[in-house]
Amino acid sequence: MVTTTLDQLRPGQGGRLVSLGGERLFRRRLMELGLLPGSRVSVVRAAPLGGVLELEVRGSLLSVRMSDAAILSVEVS
C-alpha cells in the first residue's frame, strides 16, 4: 500500500488513517472528532482555492484546513 498525506488526496479518493502529526492538543481534538488511527477516511470535496478539505469519517462530514491535512498520514486504497 502507498502511504501519503491527506492533503495529497483528491475528491473521491480515500484510505486508512495511519498517524496523526502535530501537537498533542491538536491530535486530541482530531481524535475527539473521530479521526482515529485505523479509521477509514475519504475526501468528499476540496475548496476551490485549496484552503479546506471536506472529509467523510465514520459517516460524518468534517472540514479540515489543508495545512492540518498535511500532517495526517493515510494508506491509500
Image (tube, helix red, strand yellow):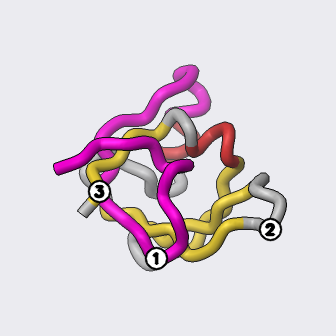
Furthest toward the right, the residue is 49
Q: How crowded is the residue under tag 1: few (<14 C-alpha within 10 Å), some, or many (20+)?
A: few
Q: Is residue 27 above or below residue 52?
A: above
Name the residue tied to disc 1: 12
State the image coordinates of residue 38 (x, y, percent, origin top left).
25, 51
Q: Secondary structure at mark 2?
A: loop
Question: Is residue 74 positioned above or below 16 on the image?
Answer: above
Residue 55: percent from left, percent from top:
55, 66
Mark 1 and mark 3: span between their CA atoms? 11 Å
What x and y, as percent, mark residue 5?
Answer: 45, 42
Disc 3 element: strand
Image position of 65 (left or right of 25): right
Distance of label 2 from label 3 (alpha carbons)? 23 Å
Among numbered discs 2 and 3, the one appearing first in the sequence: 2
User: Which residues lie in the magenta part?
Assistant: 1-27
Residue that appears at 48% across and 49% down: 6
Q: Amino acid at mark 3?
A: Val
In this rendered view, identify the residue nearer to me: 20 or 74.
74
Q: Is residue 1 left or right of residue 17?
A: left
Tell me, yes or no, whether the highlighted magenta stretch contains residue 7: yes
**Mark nearer the N terminus (1 vs 3):** 1
Q: Residues within 10 Å of mark 2 (few under 14, many from 20)?
A: few
Mark 2–mark 1 distance (CA, rounded to whole Å): 15 Å
Q: Which residue is mark 2?
A: 48
Left or right: 65 as drawn, with respect to 70:
right
The residue at 43%/68% (across/down) is: 42
Q: Which mark is residue 76?
A: 3
Residue type at tag 1: Gly
Three-letter amino acid code at the position of disc 2: Pro
Helix or strand or loop: what does disc 1 sit on?
A: loop
